[in-house]
Image (cartoon, rainbow, N blue to C red):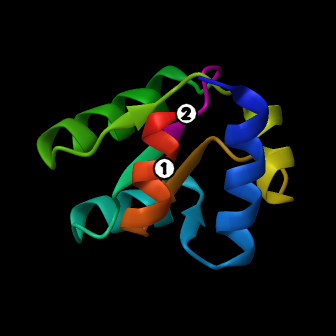
Amino acid sequence: MNKEQMVNLLGICQKAKKLVSGEMFSLEKIKNKEAKLVFLASDAGPNTSKRVRDKSAFYAVEIIDSLDTDELSMAIGKNNRKVIAIIDKGFAEKMKTL
């Protein structure tokens, strides 16, 4: 996976309003079956990590955990983001191939 391309694509996805960020918003999108792909910060805490992993596994949503909090936050221009849910199938498919 090319981290630079992933970060750039996350920024484009943010501008297109095809993602939600934050644990609660992302979990809601997973439960509503709107999330196509989930990013979980590699340095997320154990409780956050467990909640997101369990919910994603139950609803069969793939997780990418190769970026840390700073990389995720910088990519979308928001502070301290641990969880991002991609809600667009096209963006999700492209990100899975990187």
The residue depicted at 64 percent of the width and 66 percent of the height is: 13
In the image: residue 82, left or right of residue 69: left
- Give how far across and how far down residue 31 sits, in percent: 23, 63
The residue depicted at 26 percent of the width and 45 percent of the height is: 61
Q: Is residue 42 above or below residue 8?
A: above
Q: Amino acid at mark 2?
A: Leu
Q: Could you tell me which secondary element the residue under label 1 belongs to?
A: helix
The residue depicted at 32 percent of the width and 32 percent of the height is: 53
Magenta stretch: give its range.
Answer: 39-43
Instruction: Count residues near mark 1 (Cα–Cα under 10 Å), then give few for <14, some for 14-19, many for 20+.
Output: few
In the rendered image, residue 24 lying in the magenta stretch gets the answer: no
Q: Is residue 16 above or below residue 58?
A: below
In the rendered image, residue 41 lying in the magenta stretch gets the answer: yes
The residue depicted at 56 percent of the width and 67 percent of the height is: 20
* 1 and 2 marks in contact (CB < 8 Å): yes
Q: Amino acid at mark 1?
A: Lys
Q: Is residue 56 above or below residue 50?
A: below
The residue pinned by badge 1 equals 94
**Can the viewer see residue 68 in this picture?**
no
The residue pinned by badge 2 equals 98
**Image quadrant of residue 14?**
bottom right
**Image quadrant of residue 35?**
bottom left
In the image: residue 46, left or right of residue 13: left
Q: Could you tell me which secondary element the residue under label 2 belongs to?
A: loop
Q: Nearer the viewer, residue 89 or 86?
A: 89
- Give how far across and how far down residue 9 sits, in percent: 69, 53
- Helix, strand or loop: magenta stretch: loop
